[in-house]
Amino acid sequence: MRLLLLSNSTAPGHGYLEHAREEIADFLDGTRRLAFVPYAGADHDGYTAQVTRALAPLGVEVTGVHTGSRPAEVVADADAVFVGGGNSFRLLSALHHHGLVDAIRARVGAGAGYMGSSAGTNMACPTLRTTNDMPIVQPPTFDALHLVPFQINPHYLDPAPDSSHMGETRAQRIAEFHQENDVAVLGLREGTWLRATDDGLTLGGIEAGAVLFERGREPVEHRPGADLTRLLRTPAVFDSADR
Amino acid sequence: MRLLLLSNSTAPGHGYLEHAREEIADFLDGTRRLAFVPYAGADHDGYTAQVTRALAPLGVEVTGVHTGSRPAEVVADADAVFVGGGNSFRLLSALHHHGLVDAIRARVGAGAGYMGSSAGTNMACPTLRTTNDMPIVQPPTFDALHLVPFQINPHYLDPAPDSSHMGETRAQRIAEFHQENDVAVLGLREGTWLRATDDGLTLGGIEAGAVLFERGREPVEHRPGADLTRLLRTPAVFDSADR
């Protein structure tokens, strides 16, 4: 299993995927055919064109899974899969509708690389339960690709110290998650990412790093280069609240 | 039908429900028994005690629906229902689990007042599709109480002009909602509320007011006192995207 899970696709002052260019080039080294999943967005052709342009310098042939008659076949023919960001609920609905959950799990299990950004990173988790997105459509289930056994919160945001807004902070939302589920949540700040193999998990990206939230423990800060392999072995218990 | 739908329960520098004290007193005038629904929170007893304290000056007898053997019976015996804020997904799951969707609709249809704050306001809409909350648990359906035929976004927040965060703004999230659904969305800024009867809908609260989002139209600002009755007659079409 080879994964590259980006918190976000675009950093301020940079072009699409540019902030992670070297990491992506390294990850896709040797990839000829990449299946792009545009379903988190609304304009599938436009989104696929954007990804095609961004990955052109790497010599990768990008095919939108929506362009064939069967999206799962495009995945089956690819050396790597990239699931782009957008709305996680729309994305998960489409993955299930098009039979892509099984197709992607099978292809990645057989050695194809999986790259995700934002909503696409969320999909690599057991469920979408730690997304930040608005539930604009109702997926048949919250169960996602389960390529890793823990949850990720992309675009992780620290509380704004001078805010008078009374909505929950991100950390409070994750605390609510832990009232109901006993599963580790990694808050990936923008500009950071995870690289995973079957037996290793490493944090990459900018110095801001990530925060690990586990039920009943204080949050722990991690910096780029941190070895998070133990998260690949952690048991996950959803709906564990005794209420 | 009598509704009071608050964007938020607590304003900075004020106690719980204090910012809307006069409006709540007017709304609950004549109410003897109020059924409180604490399921958006994790501590049902503590939450009910907080509401009991806040409403004590009004001479209202508060009963948490979780304290009886059948929550729906507590609702059936009440003159008014108050659904408190917290996590909308947890709340909607519990409403369905305890048979409260039908019970509350029946009781409010028979003349009991319905008061909601934040997640409780979201529940008065056809669905929870415009919540800001994290989907920490999976409800059996996104369908909610449908006491009004349009959607509300509580805690509506304007884009921060100097933010470098790349996550979607609230307005962008509502635009994504309109890519998939043809339903009006009222963004209720904190400190504002709606009062509704069968034939009237009025915005109340602080000067900041609310923003009305409709598919294919520019957002429209509304100030306290605005008559929004036409929203009670607007058709709602969910999952209208042609994809």
Image: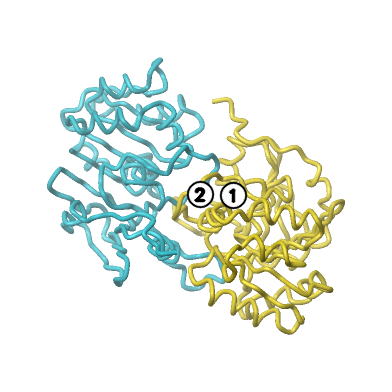
Chain colours: A yellow, B cyan
- Residue A132 visible? The answer is no
Decide if residue B170 is on the left or right side of residue B80: right
Q: Earlier in the sequence, mark 2 or mark 1?
A: 1
Q: CA distance from mark 2 to mark 1?
A: 10 Å
User: Residue sitting at 71 percent across and 38 percent down?
Assistant: A236
**Circle 2: residue type:** Pro
Q: Position of residue A62 (x, y in %)?
A: 68, 75
Res A75 → quadrant = bottom right
Decide if residue B37 is on the left or right side of residue A6: left
User: In the displayed structure, would residue A136 be above or below residue B62?
Assistant: below
Quarter that holds the N terminus of chain B: top left
Circle 2 SS class: loop
**Numbered disc 1: what chain?**
A
Decide if residue A192 is on the left or right side of residue B190: right
User: In the displayed structure, would residue B175 be above or below residue A176?
Assistant: below
Disc 2 packing (10 Å; few <14; some 14–19; many ≥20): many
User: In the displayed structure, would residue B49 be above or below residue A226?
Assistant: above
Check residue A139 in the rendering and tell me which mark sits there, or answer none: 2
Q: In this rendered view, identify the residue nearer to me: A189 or A34.
A: A34
**Numbered disc 2: what chain?**
A
Check residue A128 in the rendering and tell me which mark sits there, or answer none: 1
Q: In this rendered view, identify the residue nearer to me: B19 or A25.
A: A25
User: Residue sitting at 20 percent across and 33 percent down?
Assistant: B109
Q: Position of residue B49 (x, y in %)?
A: 41, 26
- Residue A239 visible? The answer is yes
